[in-house]
């Protein structure tokens, strides 16, 4: 990402419904599928500012891995230098079969060779351990947000599952998330695209601003409630979440 994006993220991610809700959903699925103990090692790959790793540090050992110095500098202030490591998703600075839980939250879409990244996740996670992935979904939602964040692609369920080697992973759960916000996201992005096409100035992205408290709370509640359930398989959403168990 551009260096300024890390500053934007650090300013909003603790309270913004999307970022806070995503972390809550991921915590739910980790504890549901692989309850954490103090001796477990959780590695957050592409850790950004390190906020998720810092929130999980009270439950287990954590390590934040990223390859951008702007990200690493912010993460060190939250975690300390010993729990932050420079590394790439396609070449993790970790021993094979050493990780109990690996998270890659909105990371694969940045990686040119996403299949190689998944193979690397398989290498470092021990049998019985889990990988939790989140990615942006639906190619037709592509917008200036994706461009600013240097996304290479968006996914659908089929393209995400096609990355996973059957011999390495069991798919515990895979579903679209951020379902309720989909119509609103479509409307906002189409409106921004129209304004750009006719030469009107473009407002700051909604992802960089925290909505009014009531709306922020409502969006977070719907995001988390639907993201933590497994009885409805949604046909579409703004994002995808997958929980994988290493065979």
Image (spheres, rainbow, N blue to C red):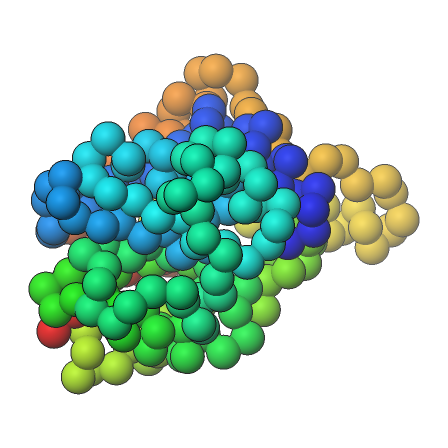
Is residue 194 among the parts visible in the rendering? Answer: yes
Residue positioned 89% across, 49% down in the render: 199
Q: Which residue is farthest front?
A: 82
Is residue 189 among the parts visible in the rendering? Answer: no
Query: Foreground: 184 or 111?
Result: 111
Q: Is residue 79 left or right of residue 57?
A: right
Q: Which residue is farthest top?
A: 213
Which quarter of the figure has residue 223?
A: top left
Q: Position of residue 74 (x, y in %)?
A: 55, 37
Residue positioned 59% across, 54% down in the render: 68
Query: Foreground: 226 or 47?
Result: 47
19 over 44 or under it: above or below: above
184 over 143 or under it: above or below: above
Q: Quadrant of the N terminus?
A: bottom right
Residue positioned 17% across, 84% down in the render: 167
Q: Which residue is farthest right?
A: 199
238 over 81 or under it: above or below: below
Q: Position of residue 204 (x, y in %)?
A: 72, 35
Query: Foreground: 33 or 58?
Result: 58
Which quarter of the figure has residue 55?
A: top left
**Number of residue marks:** 0
Q: Quadrant of the C terminus?
A: bottom left
Residue positioned 36% across, 40% down in the render: 53
Q: Position of residue 121 (x, y in %)?
A: 31, 69
Q: Position of residue 154 (x, y in %)?
A: 50, 65
Q: Is residue 188 left or right of residue 93?
A: right
């Amino acid at each position: 990402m551009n260096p300024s994006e890390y500053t934007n993220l650090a300013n909003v991610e603790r309270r913004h419904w999307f970022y806070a809700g995503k972390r809550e959903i991921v915590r739910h699925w980790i504890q549901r599928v692989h309850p954490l103990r103090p001796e477990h090692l959780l590695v957050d790959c592409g850790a950004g500012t390190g906020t998720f790793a810092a929130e999980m540090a009270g439950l287990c050992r954590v390590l934040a891995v990223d390859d951008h110095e702007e990200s690493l500098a912010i993460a060190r202030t939250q975690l300390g230098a010993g729990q932050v490591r420079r590394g790439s998703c396609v070449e993790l600075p970790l021993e094979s079969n050493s990780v109990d839980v690996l998270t890659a939250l909105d990371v694969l879409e940045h990686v040119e060779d996403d299949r190689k990244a998944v193979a690397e996740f398989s290498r470092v996670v021990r049998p019985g351990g889990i990988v939790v992935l989140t990615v942006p979904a639906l190619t037709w939602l592509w917008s200036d947000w994706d461009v600013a964040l240097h996304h290479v692609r968006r996914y659908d369920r089929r393209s995400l599952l096609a990355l996973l080697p059957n011999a390495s992973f069991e798919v515990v759960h895979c579903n679209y998330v951020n379902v309720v916000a989909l119509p609103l996201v479509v409307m906002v992005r189409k409106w921004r695209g129209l304004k750009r096409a006719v030469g009107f100035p473009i407002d700051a992205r909604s992802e960089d601003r925290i909505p009014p408290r009531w709306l922020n709370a409502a969006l977070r509640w719907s995001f988390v409630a639907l993201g933590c359930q497994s009885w409805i398989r949604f046909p579409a959403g703004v994002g995808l979440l997958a929980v994988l168990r290493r065979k």
